[in-house]
């Protein structure tokens, strides 16, 4: 799944949720770290906006070194152009790879990650890498997308009418997504990798993607099903999608969807 630059114009939901996560736990973060100068990494940083506007600007913490990591060359280039500074770096790395022997990427106090781990298949490897990056006692804080009805709408449409683009949720998303035991699996995998769970917030939220142009744009750039479709087919797909959404939304909020996320704070033992 490749994210492109256009994702950065359509990540209001991701920004809102990162900000709420930080605000909810701000007191804890400040008590935990105090005035200490921290080394911070953001995994799956994308365009760097959430790292800059939510973590750096809103956490109230003091950072001496910051690195944004992403497997997308395109997005790391954009993030560097906009946010690179004396203390902020951006690097192309895949968190599921064996790159961690990199001496540069050790001794972190805080590792943050927003809306990235549901795209990851090998959580054991990713958590092992993050564990090695952290100092003992360091925190790994992440938002994990669990599920939303909208994915079923896409999958149903694609596999009934747009069969040329046939695809399944499981081809893209982690098997923790949509799993009734998702919380249990995620906690167990973290604990097996040497983390203690400090907080596990199971959030059931909704988001208004309206108006219509915003809805079409947001969905195109934040999901893997639609990215390869031509503009012409996507237009038809969006019309069908809107028709279904209209039927489902009885209270007149035509572009509002429910979804579920886990927001987790884990500590390296
Ligand atoms: C939905 S975007 C989230 C971007 C940003 N954190 C935000 O909240 O807006 C997911 C990002 O994770 C990156 N990503 C996915 N799998 C990755 C992996 N295995 N290693 C590093 N980055 C990854 C993608 O390239 C993408 O930029």
Image (cartoon, rainbow, N blue to C red):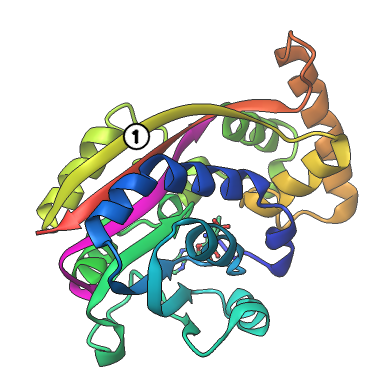
Asked if residue 214 lies in the magenta stretch, the reply is: no
| Snapshot quadrant of residue 54 | bottom right
Whole-percent x and y of residue 129? Answer: 24, 71
216 or 104: which is nearer to us?
Answer: 104
Q: Residues within 10 Å of mark 1 (few under 14, many from 20)?
A: few
269 or 39: which is nearer to us?
Answer: 39
Residue in the image at 53% along x and 30% along y:
259
SS under mark 1? strand
3 or 238: which is nearer to us?
Answer: 3
Q: Where does the C terminus fall, quadrant-wise?
A: bottom left
Whole-percent x and y of residue 241? Answer: 77, 30
Q: Please give the range of residues in magenta.
A: 132-148
Question: With 110 as the anchor, is 225 left or right in this view?
Answer: right
Residue sitting farthest toward the front: 35
Asked whether mark 1 lies closer than 8 Å to ligand 1, one says no
| Snapshot quadrant of residue 134 | bottom left
């Amino acid at each position: 799944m490749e994210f492109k630059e256009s994702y950065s114009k359509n990540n209001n939901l991701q920004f809102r949720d990162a900000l709420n996560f930080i605000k909810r736990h701000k007191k804890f973060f400040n008590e935990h770290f105090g005035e200490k100068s921290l080394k911070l990494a953001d995994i799956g940083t994308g365009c760097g906006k959430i790292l800059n506007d939510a973590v750096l600007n809103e956490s109230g913490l003091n950072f001496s070194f910051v690195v944004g990591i992403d497997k997308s060359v395109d997005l790391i280039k954009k993030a560097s152009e906009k946010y690179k500074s004396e203390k902020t770096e951006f690097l192309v790395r895949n968190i599921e790879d064996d790159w961690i022997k990199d001496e540069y990427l050790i001794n972190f106090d805080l590792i943050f990650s927003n809306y990235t781990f549901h795209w990851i298949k090998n959580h054991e490897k990713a958590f092992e890498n993050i564990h090695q990056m952290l100092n003992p006692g360091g925190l790994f804080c992440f938002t994990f997308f669990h599920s939303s009805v909208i994915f079923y709408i896409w999958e149903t449409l694609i596999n009934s009418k747009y069969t040329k683009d046939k695809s399944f949720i499981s081809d893209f998303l982690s098997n923790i997504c949509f799993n009734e035991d998702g919380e249990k699996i995620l906690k167990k995998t973290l604990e097996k990798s040497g983390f203690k769970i400090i907080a596990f917030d199971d959030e059931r939220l909704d988001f208004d993607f309206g108006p219509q142009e915003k809805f079409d744009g947001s969905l195109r750039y934040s999901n893997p099903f639609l990215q390869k479709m031509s503009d012409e087919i996507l237009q038809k797909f969006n019309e069908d999608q809107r028709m279904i959404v209209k039927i489902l939304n009885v209270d007149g909020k035509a572009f509002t969807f429910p979804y579920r996320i886990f927001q987790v704070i884990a500590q390296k033992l």
